[in-house]
Image (tube, helix red, strand yellow):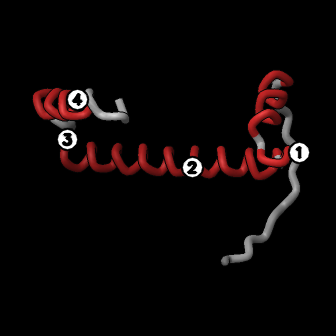
Amino acid sequence: MKVMKVRKISLTLPGDLLDEARQYADDGNISAYVADGLRRRIEFDRARRLLREIDDEWGPIPEDVREKARRAWQDTPFS
């Protein structure tokens, strides 16, 4: 297992958001909960950037192809 260096920071969060996060954080570990959310957001942003680069290079996905994909996914657990 890779050992990661950690740094301490201060965050200001809306109270209701923090209260709800505490309900879901394992053992009340807000730092791990926030780190996981931040990691997921970074992965999302990287994917979005890659899709923009692909779109810039190859052009947008044609609407008929998008519609075919929507129909294929609509009855899956992911829809």
Compared across the picture, whether 33 is left or right of 52 comes to right
From mark 4 to mark 3, how far is it between C-alphas? 19 Å
Front: mark 2 or 3: 2
In this view, 22 is above or below 27:
above
On the image, the x and y values in percent for residue 40 come to 57, 47
Q: Secondary structure at mark 1?
A: loop
Tag 1 residue: 10
Q: Could you tell which of marks 1 and 2 lies nearer the N-terminus?
A: 1
| Badge 3 or badge 1: first in the primary sequence | 1
Q: Find the distance from the CA under tag 2 to the CA under tag 4.
A: 25 Å
Determine contact: label 2, label 3, CB under 8 Å: no
Q: Which of the two discs, 4 and 3, labels the residue nearer the N terminus?
A: 3
Q: Which residue is mark 4?
A: 70
What amino acid type should be assigned to the residue bearing mark 2? Ile
Label number found at residue 42: 2
Pointers 4 and 3 in contact (C-beta within 8 Å): no
Residue 34, by quadrant, is: top right
Task: Specify whether 69 is left or right of 49.
Answer: left
Q: CA distance from mark 1 to mark 2?
A: 19 Å
Residue 59: mark: 3
Of the image marks 2 and 4, the number of the one nearer the N terminus: 2
Q: Which SS class for mark 4?
A: helix
Frontmost of labels 1 and 4 is: 4
Q: Label 2 to label 3, Cα distance in Å?
A: 24 Å
| Dot 2 crowding, Cα within 10 Å, few <14, some 14–19, many 20+ | few
Marks 3 and 1 sit apart, C-alpha to C-alpha, by 42 Å
Q: Mark 1 vs mark 4: which is more N-terminal?
A: 1
Residue type beneath disc 1: Ser
